[in-house]
Image (cartoon, rainbow, N blue to C red):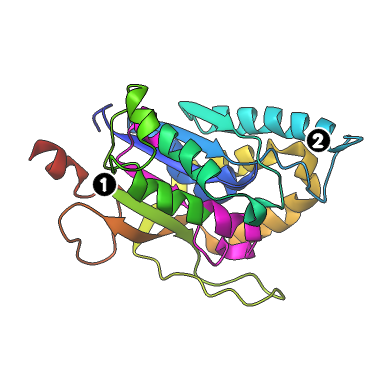
């Protein structure tokens, strides 16, 4: 696959990149796609805290773990922003959206991944807000009348081709209700499943979650599932097996 292709994933917390997109990030990187992950918070409000004595120490530890996980997944570019963990629903919306629009205009991805308004499989409020910020940024990055100060900084609008939310065949048991979006893309990550697990295990502060995560991944097997939310390429019939389906044709048009 040509190196001109780029994929951006936007998450709420360190470890989301591995849990939601890890196999796909590694798969597409190995196909020559430039990948980027933007994490909105350093995860300083996590229940599992490792050796951290306070929020600042936990944030520092989780930033290092995130960098290690991204290296395992061969992520080309990664960034952890400084929004407060557990409080994304209280943030004035233009701030994170402006940050994400700037990143989209700089990185210029064709494919953008995030989470749905349901909060992904866990239903976490921060996951919901990460998806909402990303959805607005996906659309607004293309428009000259959104954040025009960025245009003055030499960042022209960028029209990304496809926006996906991660999804799953069923919600987690014994949780508050979550209505997951139906899968429209099924990505076989079989040979990258070990990398996905290793990337999640790089988040050592979250070690109490490892048995639960490993069992969950074992039940699901090798596919990562996505729901196509917005699409600027020709209509796609059936279930996709490639997140870049249709993108090459549009690039050539």
Provide the secondary structure element on which disc 1 rests.
loop
Q: Report the side of 92 relative to 136 (left or right).
A: right
Residue 193 part of the magenta segment: no
Could you tell which of marks 2 and 1 lies nearer the N-terminus?
2
Task: Name the residue carrying label 2.
Answer: 58
Quarter of the N terminus within the rendering? top left
Determine crowd level at label 1: few under 14, some 14-19, many 20+ residues with C-alpha closer than 10 A. Answer: some
Q: Nearer the viewer, residue 54 or 144?
A: 144
Q: Report the side of 159 relative to 127 (left or right).
A: left
Q: Nearer the viewer, residue 105 or 63?
A: 105
Residue at image position (77%, 30%) is 61
Residue at image position (39%, 36%) is 104
Residue at image position (36%, 42%) is 146
Residue 45 percent coordinates (x, y): 78, 47
Q: Nearer the viewer, residue 163 or 4?
A: 163
Please say if 249 is above or below 219.
Answer: above
Task: Name the residue carrying label 1.
Answer: 161
Residue 95 is at least partly visible in this image: yes
Residue 193 is at least partly visible in this image: no
Residue farthest to the top, as pictured: 154
Label 2, label 1: how many angstroms apart (C-alpha)? 36 Å
Looking at the rendering, the stretch of residues picked out in magenta corresponds to 104-130
Q: Report the side of 225 relative to 174 (left or right).
A: left
Residue at image position (13%, 44%) is 249
Residue 169 percent coordinates (x, y): 49, 70
Residue 227: which quarter of the image? bottom left
Determine crowd level at label 2: few under 14, some 14-19, many 20+ residues with C-alpha closer than 10 A. Answer: many
Residue 244 percent coordinates (x, y): 27, 46
């Amino acid at each position: 696959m040509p190196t001109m292709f780029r994929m951006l994933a936007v998450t709420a917390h360190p470890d989301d990149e591995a849990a939601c997109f890890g196999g796909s990030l590694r798969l597409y990187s190995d196909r020559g796609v430039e990948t980027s992950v933007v994490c909105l918070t350093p995860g300083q409000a996590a229940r599992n805290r490792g050796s951290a004595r306070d929020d600042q120490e936990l944030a520092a530890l989780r930033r290092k773990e995130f960098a290690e996980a991204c290296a395992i997944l061969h992520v080309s570019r990664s960034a952890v922003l400084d929004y407060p963990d557990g409080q994304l629903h209280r943030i004035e919306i233009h701030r994170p959206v402006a940050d994400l629009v700037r990143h989209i205009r700089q990185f210029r991805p064709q494919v953008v991944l995030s989470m749905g308004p349901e909060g992904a499989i866990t239903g976490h409020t921060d996951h919901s807000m990460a998806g909402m910020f990303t959805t607005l940024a996906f659309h607004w990055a293309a428009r000259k009348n959104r954040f025009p100060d960025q245009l003055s900084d030499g960042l022209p609008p960028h029209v990304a081709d496809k926006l996906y939310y991660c999804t799953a065949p069923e919600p987690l048991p014994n949780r508050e209700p979550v209505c997951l979006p139906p899968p429209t893309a099924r990505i076989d990550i079989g040979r990258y499943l070990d990398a996905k697990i290793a990337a999640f295990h790089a988040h050592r502060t979250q070690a109490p979650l490892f048995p639960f995560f490993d069992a969950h991944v074992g039940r699901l097997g090798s596919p990562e599932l996505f729901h196509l939310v917005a699409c600027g390429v020709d209509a796609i019939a059936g279930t996709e097996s490639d997140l870049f389906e249709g993108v090459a044709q549009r690039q050539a048009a």
